[in-house]
Amino acid sequence: MHPAPSVIVFTTLSGLGFGLLIWLGLGLPAVTGWVAFAFFVIAYGLAVGGLMASTFHLGRPQRAIKAFSQWRSSWLSREGICAVAALLVMGLYAAALVFLDMRIPVLGWLGALLSLGTVFTTSMIYAQLSTVPRWKTPLTPALLVSISLAGGALLAGQASAALILLPVAGVIQVLWWVRGDGAFAASGTDMASATGLGGIGSVRAFEAPHTGTNYLLRELVHQVGRKHALKLRAIALGLGFILPVLMLLVPFTHAMALFAVISHVAGIAASRWLFFAEAEHVVGLYYGKR
Amino acid sequence: MTTLPKQTTRKLGLVIDLDTCVGCHACVVSCKGWNTENYGAPLSDQDPYGADPSGTFLNRVHSYEVQPLATSSMPHPAAQLVHFPKSCLHCEDAPCVTVCPTGASYKRVEDGIVLVNETDCIGCGLCAWACPYGARELDAAEGVMKKCTLCVDRIYNDNLPEVDRVPACVRTCPAGARHFGDFADPDSNVSKLTAERGGMDLMPEQGTRPVNQYLPPRPKDQLDQPKPVGEIDILAPFLAPVMDEPKGFLGWLDKALERI
């Protein structure tokens, strides 16, 4: 799959933003006034910034409002609804905290639930696709939700929670990679089933339908990004999970916390790049490619 | 709603005969020709006369080489070249429809055709991700998803002569490798062809239940079979005299005329 920068930025930042909103909704930390204002500005900046970035990959962004209509069948539609609902509910909750110094727990819990729902529905957009065997697993929602919770805990200054959640997310990340490497072969889709010609003999793509490239090859059979995959995995694991944990273990300073967050975001961005670049779509088989 | 209909009244689709397709790409050209100036947005090309041309097509023809396994009786089996036209299969369980967030993609209850309402499409591309066959292409100029309509603007078009009320690819195929009909009717041409020739689904394990069926290529000639013992002149029967010498009166006349 083509690792479109807009989608990588969206899933990385909005995952982190909604993760922070979950913790703020639970009252961890229990902030009010200007401190709460600062926390919510960061959370909304990440979440809304990510959502805005995601509209850049639309062919017709001016009709994006229509995407809220098909919640009964479409995970993408459900994600849009969850995101807007979470931002509205958390907006009310934040306004009460900032301007009235008043915490309305019900609103906070509801907002946290909707924020969690946003991350989950985002992950299901990928996990539902049989055409990308690497994504088609319950480990995909587990991965994205655990990263969001861990990153949110890190941003919310919940050091003890982050010290548990970061290693958990790191382990799920490794499991997701290991399973993913054998997923395409295990899916049972190959050139024989794609062409139906396997009964005659081994099938080889002899001639492509076109001399140039096309939308399918650009979008779904993007092979360039897989170079350095192993190095990027090491970077993702080191910066995303291991380094932030080490930084949390040394005595707390604000500078160290900032470095931990920056390191985490850089690591997750690398992980998200691989999430797309390493994903192999079955349509590549028709072109004799993976 | 982008939920799929439980069942459709008719199941219109194509039978593609891999045995007779010669790989001429006429269906590709006629498809683009018809669909670029009829239903929906035109099928644009980018840099068509430059160094890196690309464009939107609803139907493309792949070519595959199939190499049978060597056996002791056939140590060097000949590879077979199979031309493979591919367009939307109008699946019964179309994953492209259910993922659509706007309701632009839908499967028609009356005939099972999968269509895109281009005024609702936001060009998110998720339906192209969900399709295992590469049947959907986002038009780079228009920003909306394009796909085979089964020439919905031809097959019901009373302004066309009846012979033309089939998809453009079927109408143009010089080899008769493409057939159009209703799979819900067991007596239709496509149902009979599928039953007689062993029509198959592409990627059945993906669970899409495609309507379009592919007919497998029939076994090719046996030139690579072991040679028969002794020499047989296969041309001799055809070179034997086809007319006997005339007899009787005609024989006498023939000889008499010869002597003069």
Image (cartoon, grey):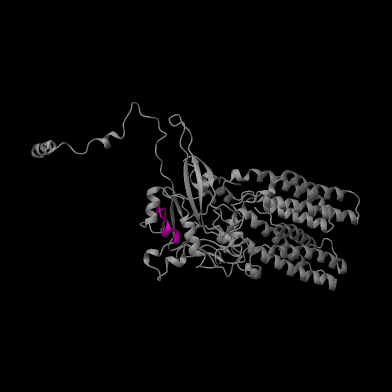
Nearer to us in this view, B154 or A272: B154
Q: Position of residue B117 (x, y in %)?
A: 55, 68
Whether residue B209 can be seen here: no
Magenta region: B168-178
Quadrant in the picture for residue A65: bottom right
Nearer to us in this view, A128 or B241: B241
Taking the magenta stretch, the answer to whether it contains residue A286 is no
Taking the magenta stretch, the answer to whether it contains residue B171 is yes
Q: Position of residue A129 (x, y in %)?
A: 61, 54
Identified at 35% across, 29% down, the residue is B228
Nearer to us in this view, A163 or B168: B168
Identified at 67% across, 66% down, the residue is A81
Seen in the image, is A118 located left or right of residue B208?
right
Q: Position of residue B217 (x, y in %)?
A: 43, 45
Whether residue A141 can be seen here: yes
Using the image, determine if residue B95 lies above or below residue B257: below
Quadrant in the picture for residue A23: bottom right
